[in-house]
Amino acid sequence: MKNRYKKILASALAAAMTISLAACGSTSGNDTDGDKKEKVELTGMVQQSRWYSGLQNMVEKLNEEENISIEFEVIPDDQYDNLMKMRLNSHEAPDLVVYQFADLFAAVNPEEFFVPLDDEAWMSKVIAPELTEYNGKHYGYCFEASNGFQGLIYNKTVFEEQGISELPKTLDEFYAICDQLKADGITPIAVPSDTWVPQIWMTSGMSRALGTEEVCEDFAEKILTNQAEFNDYPEMAAVIDEYLDLFKKGYVNEDYMTVSYDEILGRLASGEIAMIYGATEILTSIEESYPDADFSIFNPPVGYDNNDVLAYLPTAMGIAVNKDTEKLDTIKEVFELWSTPEYGNIYFESRPGFPNIEGVDGNEEAMNPDIPKIYNEYMESGRVVAQMNQYIDTLQPLFGNTLWVYFLEAPSKGNMDGKAVLDRFQQDVNKFMTEKGAEGWE
């Protein structure tokens, strides 16, 4: 794992600074006599939150021009992991599996379930090959070189109407803004019942609390080899306690245990709620869904990070190919087409980002200007660290059903502080790693 994130960070920065505006001629697979190729049908599965319009448009173009259809099953986020694992293990998975790379490799063994794609011509154009690499082979097609960074997404119109002209630089300033919003009937912080949202506070916070990549790597190595436990690091509990304080101060919507993510976004767009913790990929998705609203993002001040570190995401959405597929040649043809600007540009038309394929236009000119500004400022000064989920990704199979649930439940349990949450999770870790026969747990 050592140096892996430095490589991804460098690749992501290179992508951000060298997005090409090159274009090429049509690569339509239609026959010269005007007849389309014989119809081929592929299947896939994708999380609801990542069924992006750009991907949908690429699929539509493929169907119209190449007579290749992909029927994607769109699955609620909180059901996706379990369903994916069940289908792969029972050999009932579709041809294509959409997931976050390199997180996928912590969830399932790519050598067992997916097709390596190292020999494909488009691999030579990949900007961040580290994302799909596992034991020296590459197991997926990634659209982006990085999902950006994590921070607080906020409704700029709400801030302007409240006379908030400067973003907070200290925790006290942040609390003062929250108090002002609350006094005027605006909920400062949004938390939905989708467990992946509140956990972003902690996965960014824990890395920020440790402060550097080297310290995070050392922490992860000790945790994953049973040389230390989470509560041996008091700063880990401090991150959770600061998150819990938001509930105690009345800054969070009261229906956080039941309200859906989609409902929360509607409130955020209307100005009923001012902020939600997320990431740049989430910001661009919200902007796409609510084009008339005005949003941006900032790195919030916290009490456990004196150096103002930014948590970035060495991950990107991509597609893995099921080893059981009977249509591998067609899938390879699809990826070759998608690696061209004619197709690749479509992905970024409504969601600007950092392409993972050279020559593809990420539509950076349409990107929220605060994203590259913040991204480059922190990267150039070296104040960046990967989100904690990446360092302890061996434990990812546990997250959705244990730790992330605890983060959502803890505010409603008066006796649950950060230490109690981590003690509870440590028991899950001990059991999981013992059953795996992991080093230090034999």
Image: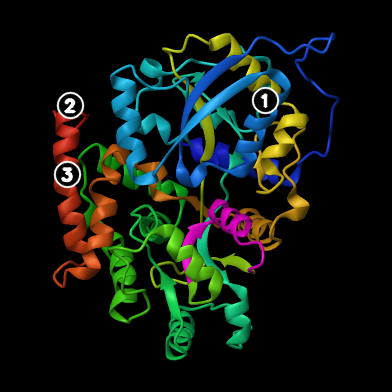
Q: Residues within 10 Å of mark 1 (few under 14, many from 20)?
A: many
Q: Residues within 10 Å of mark 2 (few under 14, many from 20)?
A: few
Whichever of callouts 3 and 2 sits on the residue coming sooner in the sequence is: 3
Question: Which residue: 58% across, 50% down?
Answer: 148
Vertical placement of residue 271 versus 109, above or below: below
Instruction: Name the residue that disc number 2 marks.
Output: 437
**The residue positioned farthest toward the bottom in the image shown:** 183
Question: Which residue: 58% across, 79% down?
Answer: 158
Vertical placement of residue 19 versus 243, above or below: above
Question: Which mark identifies residue 62?
Answer: 1
Give the x, y percent position of residue 301. 48, 72
In the image, is 393 to the left or to the right of 228? right
Whichever of callouts 1 and 2 sits on the residue coming sooner in the sequence is: 1
Query: What's the magenta region?
Result: 275-293
Instruction: Name the residue that disc number 3 marks.
Output: 428
The CA span between labels 3 and 2 is: 14 Å
